[in-house]
């Protein structure tokens, strides 16, 4: 069982940009992670199992929908607080952050933003506490980067809707109590529906044999003539802007979370380099090791500044989709590079479960692809600066 000795890097005194509340939230979540998650995460990742017993704890520390209003049982925090929580969770494991990110940004956010007051009162308090878990159904077997091509559909049957289709690569699906599903109506317009476990024809087969996000539960959503009550339609949105708005919130959280993974790899590499002796001195004393460490810290610091500024813009409701895409793309790529350099510093030990490096590296190979691939986010930025879409 690995002891968590993590100390976060703050080369540019970023703490001075945070409020006392921000730091209290960070310290609370970090202490919980060190006590409840760090000692068990390697074992669960090796077994490819999600530690379900932590769900209520995630609710207690405010990890589910932290920036949504307190009147619905949520945290009522600002966007930087939300980012900090995601950073601390992913510092432990991307899969754990995914669980919280999906719950807050992809399930609770659309119910709050696009749902009825009745839906908010019914679902949000239970989702915030972890009593109820949710998932988000957008990606399909044949439609990933092009969600507008989805074939999942529903028909108006008079007193209910009849839902058919399938979604895949869905975090939380195997144990979710509800799914926020995006599907086309008979006119081809995209809408969101809340599908509850137990509805006849709704199944959630688990995805096995993953090399990445092994401590996270992934599955499919299959709809075979599922009768969905009409009151489960999200009434205040239609079109792709609905799911895209959710993804903006989630991608913002990923931008923060990826920094956490990079920080953990850097911290582990720094400690190992100071302790590992070769040629009669610690390898931290060699120039090439110092080059790796210095470059890691530089890139982490740049990402911290980028994401903090994005958080300020989010608090002011001025952050654009292209700005969020730039941060998600940059920070995940940065974290992958840091993980790979850290693996080299650890030498052969870097591939073992004694250190977190290889687990982070494998996780980040999913993070760089999901919720908008690395290349798609590049094209979002390209379209923003040229005015010309390159998607088709």
Image (cartoon, rainbow, N blue to C red):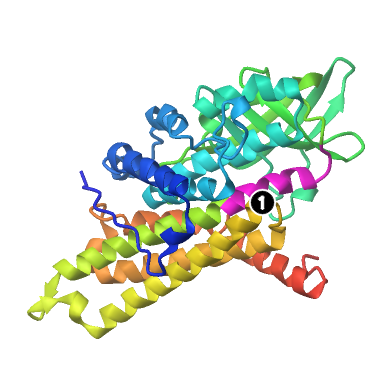
Q: Secondary structure at mark 1?
A: helix
Magenta highlight on residue 158: no
Nearer to the camera, 157 or 259: 259
Q: Is residue 324 left or right of residue 49?
A: right
Residue 111 x, y percent position in the rendering: 69, 31
The residue that mark 1 highlights is 248
Q: Quadrant of the C terminus?
A: bottom right
Q: Is residue 36 visible?
A: yes
Q: Main secondary structure of the magenta part?
A: helix
Nearer to the camera, 130 or 80: 80
Residue 171 x, y percent position in the rendering: 54, 40
Magenta residues, as a range? 237-252
Quadrant of the rendered structure where residue 216 is?
top left
Q: Is residue 386 above or below residue 3?
A: below
Q: Is residue 372 visible?
A: no
Name which residue lies at 60% across and 36% down: 220
Nearer to the camera, 366 or 332: 332
User: What residue occupies the far bottom of the structure in this picture?
Assistant: 287
Quadrant of the rendered structure where residue 40 is?
top left
**Crowd around label 1: few <14 · some 14–19 · many ≥20 (10 Å):** many
Name which residue lies at 67% across and 21% down: 121
User: What residue occupies the far right of the structure in this picture?
Assistant: 187
Magenta highlight on residue 239: yes
Q: Is residue 163 left or right of residue 271?
A: right
Name which residue lies at 44% across and 63% down: 14
């Amino acid at each position: 069982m690995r002891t968590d000795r993590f100390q976060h890097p703050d080369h540019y005194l970023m703490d001075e940009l945070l409020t006392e509340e921000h730091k209290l939230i960070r310290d609370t979540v970090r202490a919980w992670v060190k006590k409840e998650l760090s000692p068990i995460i390697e074992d669960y990742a090796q077994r490819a199992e999600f530690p379900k017993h932590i769900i209520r704890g995630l609710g207690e520390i405010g990890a589910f929908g932290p920036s949504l209003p307190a009147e619905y049982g949520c945290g009522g925090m600002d966007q930087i607080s939300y980012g900090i929580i995601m950073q601390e969770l992913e510092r432990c494991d991307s899969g754990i952050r995914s669980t919280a990110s999906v719950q807050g940004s992809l399930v609770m956010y659309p119910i709050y933003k696009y749902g009825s007051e009745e839906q908010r009162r019914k679902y949000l308090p239970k989702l915030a506490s972890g009593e109820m878990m949710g998932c988000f159904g957008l990606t399909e077997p044949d439609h990933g980067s092009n969600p507008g091509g989805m074939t999942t559909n529903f028909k108006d049957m008079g007193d209910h809707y009849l839902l058919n289709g399938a979604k895949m690569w869905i975090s939380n699906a195997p144990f979710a109590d509800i799914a926020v599903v995006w599907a086309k109506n008979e006119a081809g317009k995209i809408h969101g529906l809340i599908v509850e476990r137990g509805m006849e024809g709704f199944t959630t087969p688990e995805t096995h044999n993953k090399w990445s996000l092994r401590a996270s539960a992934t599955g499919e959503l299959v709809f075979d003539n599922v009768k969905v009550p009409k009151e489960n339609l999200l009434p205040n949105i239609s079109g792709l802007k609905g799911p895209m708005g959710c993804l903006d919130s989630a991608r913002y959280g990923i931008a923060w979370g990826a920094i956490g993974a990079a920080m953990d790899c850097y911290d582990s590499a720094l400690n190992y380099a100071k302790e590992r002796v070769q040629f009669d001195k610690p390898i931290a004393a060699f120039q090439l090791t110092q080059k790796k460490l210095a470059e890691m810290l530089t890139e982490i610091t740049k990402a911290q500044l980028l994401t903090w500024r994005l958080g300020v813009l989010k608090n002011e409701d001025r952050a654009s989709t292209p700005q969020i895409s730039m941060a998600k793309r940059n920070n995940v790529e940065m974290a992958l590079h840091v993980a790979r350099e850290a693996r080299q510093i650890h030498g052969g030990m870097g591939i073992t479960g004694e250190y977190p490096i290889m687990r982070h590296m494998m996780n980040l190979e999913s993070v760089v692809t999901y919720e908008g691939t690395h290349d798609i986010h590049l094209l979002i930025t390209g379209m923003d600066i040229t005015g010309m879409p390159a998607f088709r």
